[in-house]
Amino acid sequence: LGTHQGTLMESPQTFTYPFYQISQDFASANAMTQQLQDEFDSSVENAEAWMKAIQERLRINDNTKGPRSALEARLRETEKIRALEPEGSLKMDLILVKADAALRSISEDKKHEVLSKLKDIKALWEETAIYITHCHSRIEWVWLHWSEYLKAQDEFYTWIHNMRVTLEPDIELQLGLKEKQWQLSHAQILQNDVLNQSVLLETLLEEAASLFSRIGDPSVDEDAQKKMRVEYEGIRQEAQNRVKLLEMITKEHEQYSASVHQFQSWLNGVTERLNCCIGEATKSSAEDKLKALKEIAKDIRSGGKKWKHLENQCAEVVQNTSPLGSARLKDELEELRKALEQLKLRSSEEEERLLKIQQSESAYESQARQLEADIQKLKKDLQRLENDLDPGEGEKTEDEFVALWRKCNATRAALAAEESKIERLKAQLKELLRFSQDVQPHADSVVSAIQQYQSVRGKASKMSTDTETRLRRLIQNPLQSFEQWKPSVQMLLETPEPELAHIEAALAESSQFKEKLMTLQLKKDYLNDVLGEEKAESFLQEVAEASKEREILHRSLLQSKSKLQNLVLQHENFDAGFAPLKKKLSAIKAKLDLEKEPQPDLLGKKTQLQRLQMIQDDLAELVIHMEELEKLVQSNTTHRHEMNQLSSDSQAVKRSLEMMIQQSEDHIQKHWVYNDKLCDLQQWISVTRGKIDSFQDADGDQNAEGRLEDLERLIAEFPDKEIQLHLVEAHGQLVIETSSPEETAHVQAELDQLKESWKSLKEMATGLLKKWQLSIPVADKKKKREFVDSRWMSRPAFHLFDVDPNHKQEKMGEGQSTSSQLKLLHDFEEWLQGENTKLTKILAGTPSSAEEIKAHHSKLEELQSRVPHGQHLFEDLLHLHPFIGSSEDMEELRYRWMLYKAKLRESITSLGAGSLEEPDRFRKKRSGGVCSYLYRVCRAALPLQLLLLLLLLLAFLLPLAEETHSCTLANNFARSFKLMLRYEAPPPT
């Protein structure tokens, strides 16, 4: 203590220093706290002012009324405001940082004020973000609705124009009734098409009324709606008038055709009556036939009046028929008149012929009746013999077979006696041939009787032979059955573990064979009668040896039965463990069958892959249980075979499951690649469209040349991006092949939308380039043209301008006139347009067979063979370029030529024909074309694609770490590639 006291007394400053330091630190802390609070207040005020400014801009643009240009301007303004949303988020993050720093340093009584400001600014930001989203969505929806209406309106007016062009020409005169019916059918189809368009018209009018209530534009008011309805009613009335006129013309021709058909039927009926009278072979007398001919002649005279009526009808029909059709109608009427005259001539000639036929009829009829009577008697006798050959139904005994065999022999003897009657019938038929009457029916009767005789004789011979053969077989059947049964029993006895049911069945069969063999030994006398003494003795020796062998086999079967009964008790518990495993394997198979259906989207494919992996785990667990059960059945061959079969089935299921998992992973990979490439191209199109919009907004600035250079650089990227567009379409087709119909429609819609965006972007860029080039002086145009030409010629994807210097000098030296130069440009444009049209028609077809594919390939090769000629024409244009002028036309023509060659090469490559070899004059070596270029691009981009795929997978996993009340997780489209409104904040309700 004394020591410390002395120290304090010696150095008083040392004693007072700690209190002075504490005072300074406290003052510094107060200054720092005030600075943090000021910074927080400043950031809050800045953010609040920014948000109010944004809300004011939104309020000004939150209106859907007015013309389309104003609506488009408001839509672009809301898009710009929406692009400022990240800036607001950044301001909120800055406020939160400042608030956190201030809350840590201020006192407890001031924290409430800071928290209150923080709560107010959060609420204001949430309101602003929601207002941004809702305002943009509302204007964008009206814009899209208006666009769809204009598209449908254009289609409707196009249909009106096409129908007016179709209905304006006068009705053409047709060749005949069928052509008139076709013309009427076509007119009715057009009328039905017009009537069906009424539904589309009503829908269009409803959409116009709905759109007018939202935008109030005169283009969709009631006058425009009435105009569409009036034009439709005019088309409908014109179609109805055409149908009525064609119905009248067709009905008039139909009535004439019916009258002609009726006259022809009457003419055929009279001709048939005359033919019947001419060929009649009945007992009617000559007077009856002459009376019938007179009635026919009377009907022929009345037919002349009917022909006159047809002539009057024909004159009316000819007025509405083409000249060639009228000539045909007159020729048809003249043929009917000639047929009527011919019928009249035949009737008169028949009356003279009938008198000559009457004399020979009586003799012919008497001989024909005698022949028919003899034929009927012979057929009756043959039928009786054939009925005696009926073997009856059911199995027969040996005695019945012997009786049947003797009956067959007796029938064969009776048939030999009937042969003389057949010869007598042939002689009678020869006598009838002397007459002029038709003897074919009698000849058919004689042939039928001869065929029946031969049939009965063959049947009797065959039945006799078959009966004898079956009788011998019936006697030897027991011994043969025993010889066939013996090897199976020996094999059964040699089996290590035979089944008890098989042993018992074999014992029962052995007892049956014992009875049959004993019965054969007792029929010694009967066998001598049927087989003969020598064959019967040899047969009985074989029966005795078979009986001895049966006794030996029977004793062996009894021993085997006793062994099996002891083994059955040892393996009764196997089924208790085997049945559940088999049932579980069947359930796994059923699950696999359910997973073979294609999935509707990428999320469904990923879910299917997870289900397949769960099934794989179940199968692995099943294999473990199978291994445990196999240890219990090593000594039983039958059970081991069942386990082997179950193991084989499980291996097959495992292979099928692995293949399905691999296939599912491939499908997911293809879908990822397609989405990645689609997003890249959509992003490029969006960025490029924004740049072109900025060029249009900056139109009139002083730096026109710099903007033109930037625009030309953008246009220079178009060929590569067009190849990328084809790649996206190819990947989309791969996704379509492995997706459900719903996903297929969605992917096709995305591709169609991408094509439309590409087409509109290209048209916008080309139009802006032409506009600027027209406004730049000639010297600047030449400079820009040289710059674009050098950039196009340096591109690796197309080798279009490798021009021979000698050829160039030769062309430049010709000095053609200006008119010939313009004609050369026009000729090349027409040639290129014609070739492109042919290529489009070839690609429009879808070959389904090898012949069609070969034909498509030959057509493409023909187009490829004409490419050198087009190259010559294009080289001439390049040499004459300074004289022709209009560099924008040359650049457009150059682009079209490159695009045609790339499209042609890609088509040939897609058909599997490989790249075609061009002449050495244009290329120094064989090039792989677009296919090899795409291969190099894909090979170079593969690592980058894998990296992007990994980043995309991580991005999908990020929402899992968010709070459970986030709207990102509540939205069903959170992990899809469809357009949606994103709201990054807690739920608003």
Image (cartoon, rainbow, N blue to C red):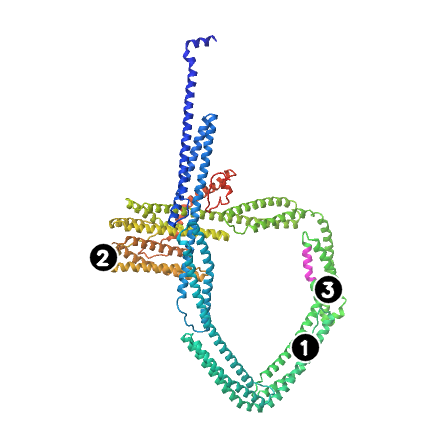
Name the N-terminal-most of marks 1 and 2.
Answer: 1
Crowding around mark 2 (Cα neighbors within 10 Å: few <14, some 14 to 19, many 20+) is: few
Cα–Cα gap, marks 1 and 3: 39 Å
Crowding around mark 3 (Cα neighbors within 10 Å: few <14, some 14 to 19, many 20+) is: some
Q: Residue at x 47, y 74 (%)?
A: 252
Amino acid carrying mark 1 in the image: Glu
Q: Secondary structure at mark 2?
A: loop
The residues colored magenta run 482-492
Q: Residue at x 72, y 49 (%)?
A: 566
Q: Secondary structure at mark 1?
A: helix
Q: Residue furthest right?
A: 522
Q: Secondary structure at mark 3?
A: helix
Cα–Cα gap, marks 1 and 2: 109 Å
User: Whole-percent x and y of residue 921?
Assistant: 30, 56
Cα–Cα gap, marks 2 and 3: 117 Å
In-front residue for pair 930/123: 123
Name the residue tied to disc 1: 386
User: Whole-percent x and y of residue 538?
Assistant: 71, 67
Crowding around mark 1 (Cα neighbors within 10 Å: few <14, some 14 to 19, many 20+) is: some
Q: Nearer the viewer, mark 1 or mark 3?
A: 1
Decide if residue 892 is on the left or right side of residue 431: left
Amino acid carrying mark 2 in the image: Gly
| Residue 854 in which image quadrant | bottom left
Residue 766, labelled with which disc?
A: none
Q: Are marks 2 and 3 in contact (CB under 8 Å)?
A: no
Residue 543, labelled with which disc?
A: 3
Name the residue tied to disc 2: 813
Magenta residue check for 487: yes
Amino acid carrying mark 3 in the image: Val
